[in-house]
Image: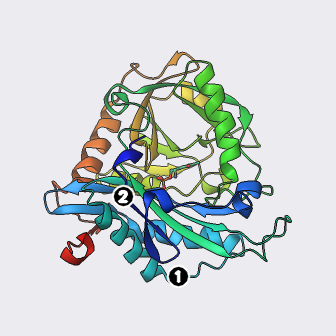
Amino acid sequence: MGFEDVKKLWMNGRLVDFADAKVHVFTHVIHYGSGVFEGIRCYKTARGPAVFRLNEHTERLYNSAHIYRMEIPFTRDEFKAAVLDTIRANEFDACYIRPLAYRGFQSLGVNPFPCPVDVFIGVWKWGKYLGPEAVEQGVDVCVSSWTRMAPNTFPAMAKTTANYANSQLVKMEALVNGYSEGIVLDVDGYVSEGSGENIFIVRGGKLLTPPLGASVLPGVTRDSVITIARDLGYEVQEASIPREMLYISDEVFFTGTAAEITPIRSIDKIKIGEGKRGSVTERLQKEFFAIVNGTIEDRFAWLTPVPVSVAAKS
Ligand code: PMP
């Protein structure tokens, strides 16, 4: 997974060696899924490493904590500085960033309130999530037999570790049946998202993506693609998508920090469009990768450069 290059992690305000970044087995989060987290990417650019949409990821992390009555004991600015420090301490020019705020070691009742809120930030090198070819060739996926959690069960807008129990069922079922990923429907039978990605369809040149009411995570990449697509002149709508509309779309693609923009070439062994990456998906990918790699102007101010500091290297 690329952990061998990791030198330091940030835990509760200080950088610690990889080998020392440990928790006790009585830590609350291990038992009850009481953690909120983020997945963020830092991209290599000609001007040095740059974190993609750090402000938006920070906001979502603090919102997730707020939903779960969890007080993160660091300000947003302290948190953002810690993310940059962690990248710098590992001297990475590109990496994946995993912050997690969780209920720590104190007592093991379901009630999380007695437990401290601990925070760590880990970084590691992570390539293409759905395989090296996926971004160009597209992936073969299925519609899961599992349903996404209903809105009044687990809040989908909070990125909590607990939600990934559902995601793991979806992912494992897809993998054992020979697919790269599963698409999960919401409690009403409409398309929700992938196990770790939002989803878009293209029909007649227009883009559609499920609304937040369809138990989707408010994806930062989802928002980026909506913004880029509208800027390029495409119409984008958030709308309920019946399952069968997937099969008759011209193009379907996933978006996510890990998956970036990944075309879907078949669903349930039904060919989507021409069974390869479509032209709209390709156009959006080109623009997205040009922005994140810093080869065109960062016109939406999405990149935060990682400042170089000699002191942090020692
Ligand atoms: N949905 C789920 C369930 C996810 O885990 C992710 C990945 N964080 C996404 C959507 C995409 O969100 P983002 O673009 O912010 O990574």
Mark 2 and mark 1 in contact? Answer it, CB < 8 Å. Answer: no
* Residue at disc 2, secondary structure: loop
Q: Is residue 228 visible?
A: yes
Q: Is residue 3 above or below residue 265?
A: below
Amino acid type shown at disc 2: Lys
Q: Quadrant of the N terminus?
A: top left
Q: Earlier in the sequence, mark 2 or mark 1?
A: 2
Q: Is residue 242 visible?
A: no
Amino acid type shown at disc 1: Phe
**Where residue 187 sits in the image (x, y, percent)?**
76, 43
Q: Nearer the viewer, residue 237 or 164?
A: 164
| Total numbered badges shown on the rendered structure | 2
Q: Indicate yes or no: mark 2 CB to ligand 1 under 8 Å.
A: no
Q: Nearer the viewer, residue 211 or 289?
A: 289
- Marks 2 and 1 sit apart, C-alpha to C-alpha, by 23 Å
Mark 2 or 1: the one toward you: 2
* Residue at disc 1, secondary structure: loop
Q: Residue at x 18, y 75 (%)?
A: 310
**Quadrant in the rendering for residue 195:** top right
Q: Which mark is residue 7?
A: 2
Residue at the disc numbered 1: 74
**Where residue 260 sits in the image (x, y, percent)?**
39, 45
Q: Residue at x 37, y 38 (%)?
A: 128
